[in-house]
Amino acid sequence: MAEEPTFTRHGDEFFLQWSGDGLDARVALTAVREVHDGVHAEVTITRGPDEIHWARLNLSSTTGRESLVKKLERADPSVPWARLLDRACHKTTDAIRQGSPTIPLKAQPAPAARCLVDPILPLGDTSVLYGDGGAGKGWTATALAVATATGAALPGGIKALARGPVLYLDWESTEDDLQDRLYLVSRGLGCGAEGIHYRRMSRAIADEISAVRAEVSRLAVKLVVVDSLAPACGAEPEGADAVIRAMNALRSLGAGVTRLVIAHVSHASATSQAPARPYGSVFVQNLARSTWELRASDENTSVDELVVGLYHRKVNRGRKHPPIGLRYTFGDHAITLERADLTESSDLMARTSVANRIRAALAGGAMSTKLLMETTGAANEDTITRTCRRMSDVVNLDATPPGAPARPARWGLKA
């Protein structure tokens, strides 16, 4: 018998295989959880092709292991079960408690910000895409999943910088629904949809995360999509505790896995002109590394068209990205996704910052302070003046020379 077993880990599932001298024994420890009295796991023991025993076991309990060994010896006395089981329990307990190592910090510049899908999904972080019902969250998440799995470029400058498998965790719809979405979106983008995996969910993500970690490891997943946050939190999704547990569970997937969380907004936020926040605790916004608000235009004239604005509301590193406009055109066998000009949708443009509205207005030529105020919908001329003075790409074309009488400003974009 080999002195050391082959030890394989997929998330929180552990597999030890002994082979040698005619011995073919395997111990699988799954559904591993540490509670108040120790590490517990479901233990499946096989000899060759035959399953010898299955049991739920406290790995640190001597009494529990001895009881299990007696049952195994009755089934097959030729195997040194006590030795194998003790080794499996000890090695698994060490692995589950190891955690992340403590490392010394160095005073050095941060590496350049990296994205899985630029500029929406920072690599290895949790991003939140939120908006009202019907705003296109599911279609946008599906397009991002397809881009990640296939490398397909999306309009609006959205592009995958790396490719890899996607795991879609779904609390809201069905496998058939998502497959139909993939069919329509991938045909519209002119690409395939391979590499996207589906898991129907019903319990809170914190309760399922052990199994999810195992799937992520087995499939070498690069992107996990959570659809959506409220049911993923479980009971009382508006509370801080439920949100923190959900976000920490997603963080436990590791720095090599990017997470996209779809979230809703309250009715008050959906009907307000002010920037919205995701529904629930402030920790949804605080624990995400990047958040994007998705708004659908109220000015759509066709039932076969959806124009949306993506607004970057939070980023932990770097600057917020300018708003992105997307147009979905729905056909019987494909959904066409194109860049949309937000200046053509007054309601979407009104939700951008004053600086963005000024920049868009000046793209057509220089304007006075008063005309800029009227064009952008700013509160007053002082707001325009202060904002223009702070903008590095805007200049007063009629600046008053020193000592000369003051004259009205005329703002334009720098050449």
Image: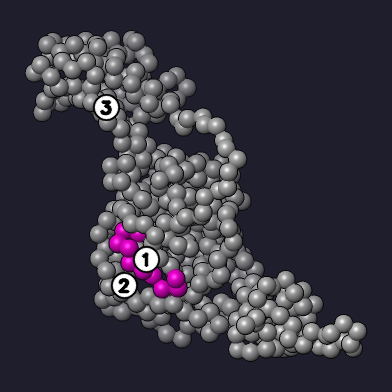
Across and down, in percent, residue 350 comes to 62, 77
- The amino acid type of the residue labelled 2 equals Leu
Position above or below: 110 against 39:
below
| Element assignment for label 3 | strand
Across and down, in percent, residue 389 comes to 75, 74
Residue 149 counted in the magenta span: yes
Find disc 3 in the rendering and name its residue. Answer: 7
- The amino acid type of the residue labelled 3 equals Phe
Question: How far separated are the C-alphas under marks 3 and 2?
Answer: 42 Å
Residues marked 1 and 2 touching at CB (< 8 Å): yes
Q: Earlier in the sequence, mark 3 or mark 1?
A: 3
The stretch in magenta equals: 148-157
Q: Is residue 346 left or right of residue 228?
A: right
Q: Quadrant of residue 23?
A: top left
Q: Residue furthest left?
A: 22
Q: Quadrant of residue 146?
A: bottom left
Residue at coordinates 18% horizontally, 15% vertically from top-left? 72
Q: Earlier in the sequence, mark 3 or mark 2?
A: 3
